[in-house]
Amino acid sequence: MSDSNGTGNRDKTRINRVITRTGDAGETGLADGSRVSKCHPRIVVLGELDELNSALGVLRARPLDSDLDAVLGLVQQMLFDIGGELAIPGHRVIDDHDLVEMESQADTINAELPPLKEFVLPGGHPDAAWCHHCRTVARRLERHVIALHETDEEAVNPVSQALINRLSDLLFVMARLINLRHEAPETLWMPKADR
């Protein structure tokens, strides 16, 4: 069914029942109608995507600068796109344009930062600390994506895998920029011999 401008029915209900009981035996359905174990590597990755998106939602619930909030909003949309890819085996949504966009956002943020001369300990301003937490969740997601790819090379869009890798870099520079804008000093790692 299309609406008057031919873009499709935007009022379509996608989820009309939350409690379905279909997963009580430990299986869940993919968007193509197939059913798999809830501990299948594909479902594990979907869970990791959900956790990262939720963590980003917590960060966005903070009073962030509008430019950073806009970037995170774009990231959340991309993560849902990747979830859609995984829910329909063989489906591809993320492309090279998305990867370039992610890199461009990271480069823009990094251009505001002073050069990094030592490793940074996670922390500083509370928003930066949470951004670092999101970065570590993104890295864990990446490890699970790689594990899924190693069991099924067709399961993961390689551009999506690269985008998730770039995402943790984006979150790292964003955490640094949040600290800089809040004038919160970064704590640098000191080797044991120098402490």
Image (tube, grey):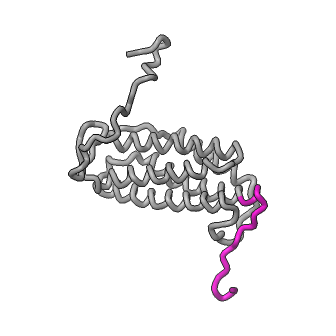
Q: In this view, does 183 lie above or below 104?
A: below
Which is more toward the observer, 113 or 162?
113
User: Which residue is depicted at the point 51% across and 40% down?
Assistant: 77
Q: Quadrant of the N terminus?
A: top left
Q: Is residue 128 left or right of residue 147?
A: right
Q: Give the image quarter of residue 31.
A: top left
Which is more toward the observer, 62 or 133?
62
Residue 74: percent from the left, percent from the top?
57, 41
Which is more toward the observer, 53 or 115?
53
Tell which residue pokes out farthest to the bottom in this image. Answer: 193
Q: In which quarter of the image is the C terminus?
A: bottom right
User: Which residue is depicted at the point 36% across and 44% down?
Assistant: 86
Residue 42: percent from the left, percent from the top?
33, 51
Which residues are the magenta region?
179-195
Q: Is residue 170 left or right of residue 66?
A: left
User: Which residue is depicted at the point 74% across and 57% down?
Assistant: 113
Q: In this view, does 124 lie above or below 95?
A: below
Q: Give the image quarter of residue 186.
A: bottom right
Tell which residue pokes out farthest to the top in this image. Answer: 4
As for residue 154 lying within the magenta part, the answer is no
Q: Is residue 12 above or below residue 127?
A: above
Q: Is residue 24 left or right of residue 145?
A: left
